[in-house]
Amino acid sequence: MLASASGSDEPASERALPAALTALLATPSAGGARTVGDDHFEVWICHVPLDSSAAMYGGLPLRLSLTLQGVTDVVSDRVPAYFDTLSQGRYRPVFAAGGEVTIAADDQPQACVDGAVAGASDDTDAVLVVADAEHAGDQPGGFGSGGDPCPANGNCSIATTRRLAYVGASDFHPDWGDDPPMDLVEHEIGHSLGWVHSGTNDAGDYLSGLDLMSNSAAPREADPTRRNGPGTLAINLFLAGWLPAKDVAVATDEATTKLSPSNGDKGTRLLVLDNGRGSMFTVELLTADGLDGHLPATGISVHEVHIVDGALEPMAPMVGNPPYLALLQPGIVLKFGQWTLTATDDWTVTCRKAASP
C-alpha cells in the first residue's frame, strides 16, 4: 500500500518514518551536519615529482604552476553558487587557502591528502586537494570521501573525520583561460557529503548523464559553455536533508502519485518503491531546465537502490540506455523488477508490483 507523508500537517519529526526511509537515513550517505549551513574547506596544492611512479599520474610530464590563492579564488567563484542552487540555499561550501604539500616519487595520491589533513587547521571541516599533475587517461579524475562520523563527544575536527575531495590538475590547465570547469570538483565534494556513484559499470566507468555522481561533465558535453555539473538524484537531496520526508512517498505494492519536479521546492518529489531488505527503486520527475538543462526532454527517471551491510551501493538507472538521458514519457509502460510503471501527461505515475509466485 501507499504510505505518503506529502501534504500532511504533522511535523516530520513527530511521524514514524517508513522503514525504507529510516534505513536510508541510517547509512553513511545521510548528510547530517555536513550538509547544513557553511561547510569549511581548506584548499591545498599537492606537488607531484616528475619521476612519480604512481599509476594515477601515468608518467605524464606536465606540472602546472598552480598558486594556492589562485585555485582558492576559482573554486570560491563557482562552486558555492552551484550548491546554493542544488540545496535551495541550505548548504554552502566555503573555501580558504590552506597550504602546500610535496609528495615523494614513490608516493600515491593518498599521500597528498594525508599531508593536507595533517596540516589543516582544527576548525576546518574538510580539505580540497588539487594536484599540480594531470591524471593518466585511464585513471579517475579524482576521489572524495565523507570520512569518519563525528564521535559522541562532538569533536568533528578534520583530524577525526578526514573528510576530503581530491582532483588532478586537468581542470586547472591554462587552456581553460579564466573559465575552467568545476563539475569534477563538485562531484568530489558530493563524495565528501557521503554520496555514492550512480550509473557506473563494473569497471567504474560513468555511463549516466543524469547525476552529478555519475558523468558530471554531461552538461558540458551537450553545451560546451556549461561549467557546472548536472543536478543530483532526489535520493541524494533527501539524504542531505534538502528534500524533506513530507515530500517523499513510499509504496510496497502499488501507488498512484502525482510527482512534482525533484529540483523543485514542494509536492511529492520522490517516490520510493520498497522491496524490503534494503532493496528499493526510486522514481522522480526530472525537468529539462536549470542544472538539468542538458536533458532533451522532461521525463521520469527510475533508479535501483540497494543497502548492503548498512551502506548504499552505487545506484543503477532503469530507464533507457547510456547515457540514460531519454527519460520515460507519458503513456509508455516501463517494467523493472516486479514493478510496472506508467505516467500521464500531468506526471501522475501509477506503479504496481506483481504478486510473488
Image (spheres, rainbow, N blue to C red):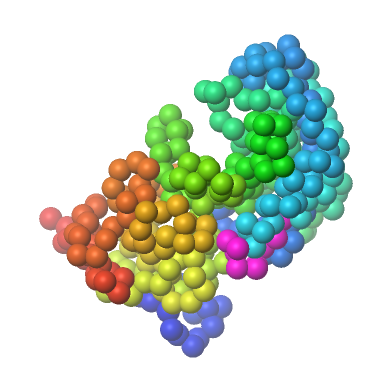
- Which residue is rendered at x = 67% and y = 52% of the image? 79
- Residue 216: x, y in percent? 52, 44
Q: Which residues are magenta?
A: 85-93
Could you tell me if residue 60 is visible in this image?
Answer: yes
- Residue 69: x, y in percent? 84, 42
Against 10, residue 270 (above or below) is above
Against 293, residue 188 (above or below) is above
Q: Nearer the viewer, residue 209 or 255?
A: 209
Against 298, residue 132 (above or below) is above
- Which residue is rendered at x = 21% and y = 55% of the image? 335
- Residue 119: x, y in percent? 86, 38
213 relative to 79 in the view: left or right: left
- Residue 90: x, y in percent? 65, 67
188 relative to 314 in the view: left or right: right
Asked which quadrant contains residue 201, the reply is top left
Whether the magenta-drawn stretch holds residue 86 is answered as yes
